[in-house]
């Protein structure tokens, strides 16, 4: 199924979801000085289906302590496939894996919004 993953997730009231990402001083240019106790700059970024899928596939939980290297590689390859495209063709098995990971790691709002997008049928044809 073709899934558009560059879609920004929204809160229940329809406003866009955002999160804060940290950037090393050497990798992020800012006109403001960073305090010595905080060696990072922060930037507000959109939460997209793509970022949720990739981050949850690459995350490690205590439950993952005993999974095989083959399973980890499968997750990595799927995350790479999703990261490389704005729209991606996913099999039913891949969608199930992504939903499982999102369900294990994310908060209810992200789970609900991501599942809605992953379960949507392609109506562009």
Image (cartoon, grey):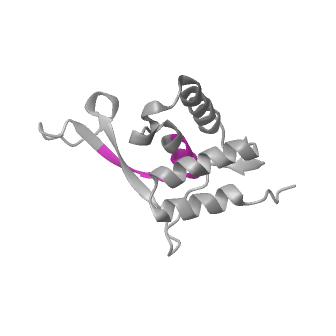
Q: Is residue 92 above or below residue 81?
A: below
Image quarter of residue 79: top right
- Front residue (pair 99, 85): 99
Name the side, left or right, on which 48 lies relative to 40: right
Image quarter of residue 54: top right
The x, y position of residue 116, in whole percent, is: 64, 63
The x, y position of residue 75, in whole percent, is: 58, 34
The residue at 87%/55% (across/down) is: 125
Which residue is the extreme one toward the top? 69
Q: Is residue 61 above or below residue 9?
A: above
Is residue 105 magenta-colored? no
The residue at 54%/29% (across/down) is: 72
- Front residue (pair 83, 39): 83
In the image, the segment drawn in magenta is 42-54
The residue at 21%/43% (across/down) is: 32
Q: Is residue 54 above or below residue 107?
A: above
The x, y position of residue 18, in whole percent, is: 43, 57
Which residue is the extreme one toward the right? 125
The x, y position of residue 6, in whole percent, is: 61, 49
């Amino acid at each position: 199924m073709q899934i558009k993953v560059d879609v920004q997730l929204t809160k229940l009231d329809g406003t866009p979801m955002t999160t804060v990402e940290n950037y090393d001083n050497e990798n992020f240019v800012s006109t403001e000085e960073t305090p010595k106790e905080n060696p990072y700059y922060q930037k507000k970024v959109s939460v997209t289906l793509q970022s949720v899928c990739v981050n949850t596939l690459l995350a490690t939980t205590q439950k993952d302590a005993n999974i095989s290297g083959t399973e980890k590689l499968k997750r990595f390859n799927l995350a790479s496939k999703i990261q490389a495209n704005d729209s991606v063709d996913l099999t039913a098995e891949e969608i199930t894996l992504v939903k499982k990971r999102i369900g294990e790691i994310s908060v209810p709002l992200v789970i609900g919004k991501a599942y809605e997008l992953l379960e949507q049928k392609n109506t562009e044809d």
